[in-house]
Image (tube, coloured by chain):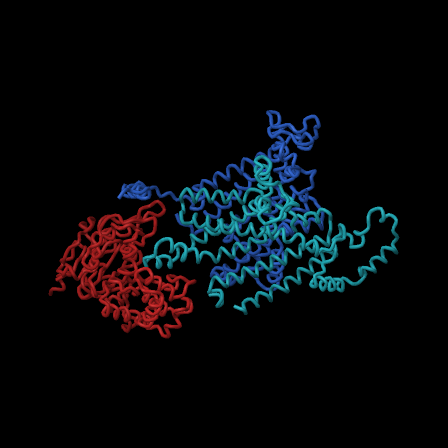
Chain colours: A red, B blue, C cyan
Amino acid sequence: MSDVNDIALSVRNLKTFFYTNNRCNKAVNGVSFDVKKGKTLCIVGESGCGKSVTAATIMQLLPTLSRIEEGEIIFQKDDKKINIEKLEKNGKEMRAIRGSDIAMIFQDPMTALNPVYTVGFQISENLKYHTTLNKKQIREKCISLLSDMGIPLPEQRIDEYPHSYSGGMRQRAMIAMAMACNPKILIADEPTTALDVTIQAQIFELMDKLKQENDTAIILITHDMGVVAELADNVAVMYMGNIVEAGTADDVLRRPTHPYTKALLESVPVLGRGKDQDINPIKGSTPDPYNRPVGCQFAPRCNWKTESCDVMPEIQQINETHQIRCHKYEQFFESYNE
Amino acid sequence: MAKSSLDKKFDKIREREESKSFSTKKRSRIVSKFVNNRLAVFGLIIFSIILLATIFAPLLSPYDPMRVDLRSMRQSPSLDHWFGTDNTGRDVFTRVLFGGRVSIFIGLGSAILSALVGIAIGCYAGYKGGWIDLIALRVSEIFMSFPQIILVLLLVSITGQSLFNLMAIFILTGWGGMYRLARARMLSLREEEYVQALRSFGLSTFTICYKHMLPNALSPIMVNITLSTAMFILTEAGLSFLGLGVPLNIPTWGNILNVAQDILVLQNYWWMWGPVGIVISVFVLCVNFIGDGLRDSTDPSQQG
Amino acid sequence: MITYIIQRLFIFFPMLLVISFLVYLGLELAPGDAVSHMISPELASTITAEQLNAMREAYGLNQSFLKRYWLWLISMIQGDMGYSMAGGVAISEIMAKTIPATLELSIVALIFSTIIGCSLGVISALKRGSGTDNSLTVAGMAGVSIPEFFFGLVAILLFAIELRWLPVGGRLLPHYETVWDRIPNIVLPSMVLALMMTAGAMRYARSSMLDVLAREFITTARSKGMPEWRINILHGFRVALTPVVVLIGFRLPLLIGGSTIIEQVYQWPGIGSMFIRSVRASDYPLVMTISLMYVFVVLTASLIIDVLTALIDPRVRLGKE
């Protein structure tokens, strides 16, 4: 039962195309999903499937040689609906949303933070532009943010530069920066790929805490199924610019129906199973985006491909929460009903 | 919302893509990038024209660049004398052509020779390290502590003026740049795996250094040579203009400009110095276009 | 920070010492010596070997090379730079008279070229690929291709002779009283000198800016909802500045060297035109001493640039990262 008021962001049939080197790359080719308040949506997929592009599109942070081709991004601000795709890319309205309503954290905190300004300065920029606090209040808020994120000695750290922070601390500082104005949606683009596994756990714990305390909706982009298992409330599996399967974490992880999802789950080696476990890589490799297969993008690598797969499957609802893009989903799903 | 020109461009690309009208020619990426750089191609054409004109100078002009003809002094440009005549009746156009031979020879020759010296030392020093490297480094630092013109003038005052001396001085002051470049490349390539492999095969230092590692450093070297050529031509022009470069009896572009030091000539006889200056500027500009084009097309990090 | 400066000074002084030694060696190897240059041609035919020797003895020229070098070094440090061949004027006096003129010219050119060059470079980067960018790039290349003295001559012809807006050359006229009087004279030479530096600064600023604008932290800044101008200047330009400062510093020797020719063209009484005069006259002591001074300036400039870099970029301060 998805109550409309539960939804923070709604993406409908989004298409984002890239136009570099005089070619057209359909990076995101018809993607739809909902982001619910206070819940984590994990977007999973291999590199190049378009998940980061989707995130960038939501914030209108696309590079110059690209554009939103079609579709809608509907942001629920209080009781108003705002169509993000209709806003001017760096216009006043969009900028008001960025940072204060929707915020983003990036993969590598070392390169994502400006090396010549103190951490405090960079956090305070956010507050300066979206709130009416004075200088002293801003500084206090920065210190409390850093301490909330678990950074020791925040009064000292606030005046230090990014390169004197450790990797995990930098990411916490970035999260502090993103959460400064208490955004309704936090987009995290592979936030722990550049960090140690132990730090990874801490960061995710932090994000979970924020979600619960502030009712923030989180869009977590990752290629790591383990992370999905840990954190996701809802999952969307992407492949070559489309969502092939989506639903609650339970739906997708316990009853994976799309061949790609199944293959992804099977290809993850399990810690503790020993060296003789079967490692099942997915056969073939992702196609050249400029030379795509016709119809279902996964067909060339799929073990159950038939002639009908030459036509791109539509999104079908298996049940209320579980969606899929596959012609043969019924026969796959049957096995779960037994 | 009205469609911007960028939008229209995108629409065209998308149409083309969807109708699959795409040729995937496998031309060498470097060559096609260069050819697409209109400035570079333009530069190459004009450069070649001027170069060939100077090489075939005797065919292009009936006059002797050295022959004094006091009856035709200071004539303004005409059909007989395309650039007019100078203070002693010599045809300026011919002098420009013949002067070009010397100037280009000095510029290009010094650039190539100083590159050879710099690369030879740099490769070896960068690869081997040790005291050769240390000495070469300090020596090149010393040379680099002087502004180039000052160093050149200094050496000219000690050795005296001659064509040969000038080129020797240019090479002496110029090898440092190429040395550092080659050395830096060597240092970074030295740690590559294929070098370790070559070493384990027992190949001599000489072979590894010059036969295997050098080709990888070729593109920045080429770019550097073109830019050095530009610099040397300008330096020679400046020195000869002052009368401190190539001896005045040999025509060079700079020497021809020497007469412009006289304010009377400057004001009244523009053809004696104007066209030469323009020729130098155009030639050096073309060399710069080519160098830039080379740099852009061989630089792997450039995007479309 | 202090340790950083001390480290740099450790390189500075030995380098200066080595070069001063080479300079003095050059003086030694040059044809003739102090005495032979002091004698006019008429006297040379009548003077005897004993008299020459006596003169050499008096001037201490018969001591060993190293001893003379040492004495020369000491007196240099104390400010006594010896005497010029032509006219026997104290070199220190010559320096004192001419250096201010060159400084004036160089500093004006440096300020102009840096400000204009950086601004144009940044504009070029922000409007990448547009008509503005392309024309500026080509203009920049033209700027480094035209021989500066040629440009200087054309400028004289146009502005001084034909249009009569500005004087033909020289620095001071007897009736000049205030600073404002002197401005017309400095315009042409400094602008011509600035030309080449501007083109260089523009190119570096553009490529550095493009480089920085592609970096992640720019996207981060944008994701916070900052306006474009703030992103471009505070985040973009601020970080792009460091390499630009370094690169401009590398070009300083060119500025110093370039002033020689321009001074000659515009009859500007600076150390550059003095240097050329001394080369023409084979006035070796003057040639060598001025060269040494140039080296001193270049080394000092490098030192200053290094310190500036450390100030601007906190990463350098705490040791390379």
Q: Which one is in front, A171 or B297?
A: A171
- Tell me: C312 left or right of C220: right
Could you tell me if residue B90 is visible in this image? yes
The correct choice, above or below, for B272 with respect to C294 in the image is above
Q: Residue B98 in the image: x percent, y percent?
A: 63, 35
Res B85 → quadrant: top right
Q: Which one is in front, B7 or B42?
A: B7
- Tell me: A315 left or right of A126: left
Could you tell me if residue A49 is visible in this image? no
Residue at the image point whose x is 73% and y is 47% from the top:
C281
Q: Count of labels shown?
A: 0
Q: Residue B219 in the image: x percent, y percent?
A: 50, 50
Q: Residue C113 in the image: x percent, y percent?
A: 52, 49
- Tell me: C121 left or right of A291: right
Q: Quadrant of the N terminus of chain B?
A: top left
Residue at the image point whose x is 38% and y is 56% from the top:
C231
